[in-house]
Image (spheres, rainbow, N blue to C red):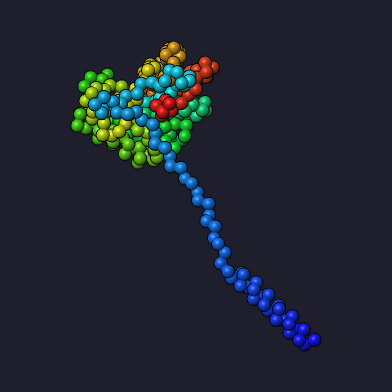
Amino acid sequence: MVITLVRRVTAACVLSAALAACAATPQPVRPAPSATTTAPSAPPTLAPGPGGLTPVFKNGSRTHGRTVALTFDADMTADQGARAAAGEHFDNPGLIAALRALKVPATVFMTGRWAEQYPEQARSLGRDPLFEVANHSYSHYAFTDDCYGLPTVSGDRMRADVERAYAAFRRAGVPDARPYFRFPGGCYDRRALKALTPVGVTAVQWDVVSGDAFATDAEAVTRQVLEGVRPGSVVVMHCTRSAAPTTERVVRTVVPQLRERGFRFVKVSELIGS
């Protein structure tokens, strides 16, 4: 009986040792599934124009669907700070609220001076996926000698003016301003296109002039937009209460009517990339 007990104890010890050995044996470590992160794609731009000049985009395809881009110039010149301090409104929160309520994507061409005056609004626009912020120069000075009476920026300062605007956007908290540029007044020539070539922007013009600048008749502006829009159109409007007081009313009328016609609103980047 003692022998039997010893054998049982010995067997138990052997089994216990074997289990302990198994537990101590390192098990193969399976690598954790790697998280794949997709880097954000760069915004679409146009290839350089003839002679390597800055390319110019006017409208999108007329045959790739009924799309239209509403664009808004947030204008403020470098010397209008005193007017803003005196109470003039170069912003238009009601317009932006209308675009958000109507769920209309849009591209805002902003001057650096505007971003400095309204940094919270600039940051809000820049971080809202409904919008994209693009460059409208820092000073809103003209890039040609004769452009609607605007002050002019010298040829050797054109590039610096555009880069200064991008710096103002970054300071305001705009994380990803687009590589698109709109000339103040829409005025440009070969010298201006050459000056901006190193910046790598696509110049964006338009094919529909809303006529909202300094307009007081919202119905007339609405008619002009509705009569001008075609598939692929880029509409130029303004985000400045003092200079374009009818724009919010125009947008609230134009958007549902264009949607009834089968148009889909897109940002400029989508038109360029299509």
Determine the residue positioned at 37% across, 26% down: 73
* The furthest residue to the right: 1
152 and 25: which is toward the camera = 25
Q: Residue 39, how many percent across, how many down?
A: 43, 42
Q: Residue 6, how many percent across, how many down?
A: 73, 84
Query: Can see residue 262?
Result: yes
121 shown above or below 250: below
Determine the residue positioned at 44% across, 37% down: 127
125 and 190: which is toward the camera = 190
Left/right of residue 45 with respect to residue 130 in the rendered view: left
* The furthest residue to the bottom: 2
Q: Residue 259, how many percent across, how many down?
A: 52, 19
Q: How many marks?
A: 0
Left/right of residue 132 with respect to residue 81 in the rendered view: right
Q: Residue 190, how many percent across, how many down?
A: 23, 23
172 shown above or below 3: above
84 and 152: which is toward the camera = 152
Determine the residue positioned at 43% across, 26% down: 274
126 and 1: which is toward the camera = 1
Query: Can see residue 91?
Result: no
Determine the residue positioned at 29% across, 28% down: 48
Q: Give the image quarter of residue 240.
A: top left
Which quadrant is home to the N terminus?
bottom right
Q: Give the image quarter of residue 88.
A: top left
